[in-house]
Image (cartoon, rainbow, N blue to C red):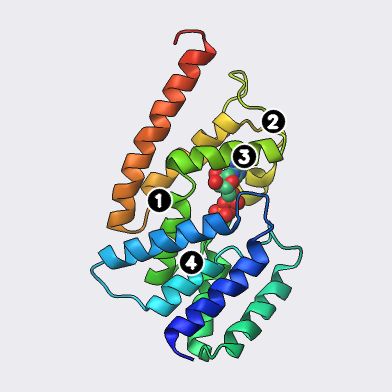
Amino acid sequence: MNIEQQLAAVRRYTCKKMKNDKTGHGFDHIQRVVATAQYLAAHESQTTDRLIVISAAYLHDITDDKLVADSQKSEAELRLFLESIEFSTTQIAAVVAITHNLSFSKSLEKNPPRLSLAGQIVQDADRLDAIGAIGIARAIYYGGTHQETIYDPQIKPRKSLSKTEYRNLNNETIINHFYEKLLKLKDLMNTVSGKQLAEQRQQFMLTFLTEFKAEWQGKS
Ligand code: ADP
Ligand code: NI
């Protein structure tokens, strides 16, 4: 198999697994992450392995414990799949190290894992999809699915969050999610071009929050 055939197979595998997702991690999210990861990789001074970056971008959510009942099982399945499309042992290890360690909730653990440059690129691409206009839409969508309150000025954003606290949605509001996570992502970007895109998206979220609060108070 050549690289293009391998990437087409990875794309089909992901599409099959994610197409019915209703949590905001559907195939549309995956396609945006792939496109952004390619953009970021093209703007990095150091070269990265295209097969690893694009495959990891496609596969980054596929073994996540919030989306699959048994993430060990789906990781084992993923390894077999990659083997079946002729990824070498080193390439499989590189992709799995990224899918295993990428998520925001992982970064809240005591000793957050270090990512390869390819992993840092995919992580930036994933985080960029959580901010800006798309990020606002996804937060509202997620909040609706989990029956969060839209906003309550009495409930203050939580300061520092462990993984368990992050996933505890009692008393969570959609607007607080911006302060607890989304506005922090800009400063967590790994790549220079990721930072630039994040700046723009940050401004858009800040404008949204200012307008939202003004309207809430009947001032706008
Ligand atoms: P990751 O895949 O990096 O662990 P999440 O699954 O936590 O990220 O987030 C997926 C999407 O859902 C993101 O766009 C995120 O902002 C949104 N989201 C996560 N938690 C909440 C929440 N409590 N309220 C609103 N949106 C949320
Ligand atoms: Ni994702």
Q: Which mark is residue 171?
A: 2
Residue labelled with disc 3: 141
Mark toward the viewer: 2 or 4? 4
Residue labelled with disc 1: 188
What element does badge 1 sit on?
A: helix
- Distance from disc 2 to disc 4, alpha carbons, whole Å, reads 33 Å
Residue type marked 4: Ala
The answer to whether residue 112 is visible is yes
- Of the two numbered discs 2 and 4 on the same chain, state the one appearing first in sequence: 4
The residue that appears at 67% across and 46% down in the rendered structure is: 167
Mark toward the viewer: 2 or 3? 3
The residue that appears at 62% across and 30% down in the rendered structure is: 173
- Distance from disc 4 to disc 3, alpha carbons, whole Å, reads 22 Å
- Of the two numbered discs 2 and 3 on the same chain, state the one appearing first in sequence: 3
What element does badge 4 sit on?
A: helix
Residue type marked 1: Leu
- In the picture as drawn, the residue positioned furthest to the left comes out as 45
- Of the two numbered discs 4 and 1 on the same chain, state the one appearing first in sequence: 4
- Distance from disc 4 to disc 1, alpha carbons, whole Å, reads 18 Å
Residue labelled with disc 4: 57
Mark 3 surroundings within 10 Å by alpha-carbon count, few (fewer than 14), some (14 through 19), many (20 or more):
some
Count of all numbered marks drawn on residues in the image? 4
Mark 4 surroundings within 10 Å by alpha-carbon count, few (fewer than 14), some (14 through 19), many (20 or more):
many
The residue that appears at 32% across and 59% down in the rendered structure is: 191
- Distance from disc 2 to disc 1, alpha carbons, whole Å, reads 26 Å
Residue 58 spot, x, y in % from top left: 52, 68
Occupied quadrant, residue 74: bottom right
The quadrant of the image that shows the C terminus is top left
- Distance from disc 2 to disc 3, alpha carbons, whole Å, reads 17 Å
Mark toward the viewer: 4 or 1? 4
